[in-house]
Image (cartoon, helix red, strand yellow):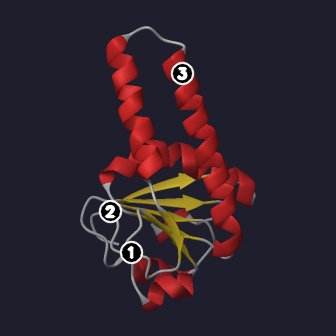
Amino acid sequence: MHDLYAEARTAHDTSMQAWDIARHLYARIRQGKVAIVASQSASFLPCLQKQWQRLMRKALQERTSTTNAIYILEISCQVAHMQATRFAIGAEAYHCDVAIATSSQFLQAPPICQTMYITEQLPRQTYHQLTAWMPKNCLVVYYDCHNKSRH
């Protein structure tokens, strides 16, 4: 993992991780493609999409509650980008903005992304293999009991 930024975050279950990733993704999605390593990708996707929809509704409510034209324009652009964001399960989902897969799936088809979220504890070698194809200065976000010596 050379020249990557690492961020450790805490969320103890799938729904908390999905909520935290959705909020973090709100700010990061314009940076480029995103990969999410989840032990159960099929069950993680609906949780993440639910949180994403909640954030979108919150942004729309915020837009309707203001009279500041510049702020309305900013929120409108962000909501449009959120609505266009595509989620998919599987490491080979190159057409989407957010790919969710298991570590073994991503090892078979390494993700080239600007942001990677790792929601499970993995061996050190697997971390390095997963992040080897990431460009310089990208972000890797670790969840739960990840040891700082792995960064």
Circles 2 and 3: CB distance less than 8 Å? no
Circles 1 and 2: CB distance less than 8 Å? yes
Disc on res. 146: none
Q: Which residue is mark 2?
A: 4
Circles 3 and 1: CB distance less than 8 Å? no
Q: Is residue 47 left or right of residue 23?
A: right
Residue located at (66% from left, 76% from top): 39
Farthest top residue?
67
Query: So how many labels did they put on this image?
Result: 3
Please provide percent x and percent y for residue 145.
66, 63
Asked where in the image residue 133 lies, by quadrant, the reply is bottom left
Q: Residues within 10 Å of mark 2 (few under 14, many from 20)?
A: some
- Label 3 vs 1, first from the N-terminus: 3
Please provide percent x and percent y for residue 132.
33, 79
Element type at mark 2:
loop
Disc on res. 62: 3
The residues bearing labels 3 and 1 have C-alpha atoms spaced at a distance of 36 Å
Q: Which residue is mark 1?
A: 131
